[in-house]
Amino acid sequence: MNVLIFNGCSDYKPDTTGRRLAACLQQQFEALDLPVTPYHISASPIPFFDLHATRPPAAVAEMCDLFMGSDLQVWMTPLYHGGMTGVMKNCFDWLELTARAEKPYLTDKVVGLVAWADGGQAMQGINAMDAVAKALRAWVVPYTVPLVKNHLYAGGNRQELAVEPIRKLDRLVGIMANARRLLLPMVLCLMLVVNS
């Protein structure tokens, strides 16, 4: 099982909340012996979506391959104007290039959702990502992680994540690891029923 951690934070600084959360998730998945590929939007040169491009840029093809090649995905975003970041949505739009694949979009992928915001509005980001995940045919685990930015760090500094967010991320990782293991036989049974 391959895990993609998709960090939608567009900030380039190495100590951003998105990168800290991604590092925490990576450590937790690796503790379960699951290989992880972190993908940070801030480090990728993904251009604006152009459905009519005759040949997608190499960075877009690589990104699509990462999405298609992972079994588990965690999508993370800070709340921007009531939803996910625009650059994150732009990446999802590029997945239209997979429409003619045998398993198009994110068919049968298991997705976990994490969002953070000032105040208690992070659930809006979760809802926006949930709608996109379902439109792309992914399975969203029923446990999501909306986080209040003021409660993310221990002791008032921005150096160490607090215990509660780490506990929530750990629970998400455990649910996702079990979901994929349990989901695969169910999907195979559904395919047999549909094809009979």
Image (cartoon, helix red, strand yellow):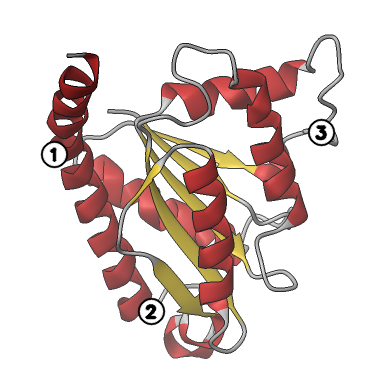
Label 3 element class: loop
The quadrant in which residue 40 appears is top right
Closer to the chain start, of discs 2 and 1, is: 2
Q: Position of residue 153 (x, y in %)?
A: 47, 80
Q: Position of residue 94 (x, y in %)?
A: 70, 30
Q: Badge 3: few (under 14), some or many (20 or more) residues near its Cα, within 10 Å?
A: some
User: Which corner quadrant holds the C terminus?
Assistant: top left
Q: Nearer the viewer, residue 95 or 33?
A: 95
Q: Nearer the viewer, residue 26 or 105?
A: 105
Alpha carbons under labels 2 and 1: distance apart: 31 Å
* 180 relative to 104, above or below: below
**Residue at 69 percent of width and 73 percent of height:** 82
What numbered label is drawn on residue 192?
none
* 103 relative to 120, above or below: above
Q: Badge 1: few (under 14), some or many (20 or more) residues near its Cα, within 10 Å?
A: few
Q: Which residue is mark 3?
A: 49
- Relative horizontal placement of residue 191, taking residue 55 as reference (left or right): left
Label 1 element class: helix
Label 2 element class: loop
Looking at the image, do the residues carrying marks 1 and 3 touch, with CB atoms under 8 Å apart?
Answer: no
* 71 relative to 160, above or below: above
- Amino acid at pointer 2: Ala
Q: Which residue is mark 2?
A: 162
Q: Which residue is mark 1?
A: 182
- Amino acid at pointer 1: Leu
**Residue at 40 percent of width and 68 percent of height:** 145
**Residue at 51 percent of width and 29 percent of height:** 67
> Can residue 152 be seen here?
yes
* 48 relative to 151, above or below: above
Alpha carbons under labels 3 and 2: distance apart: 37 Å
Looking at the image, do the residues carrying marks 2 and 1 touch, with CB atoms under 8 Å apart?
Answer: no
Closer to the chain start, of discs 3 and 2, is: 3
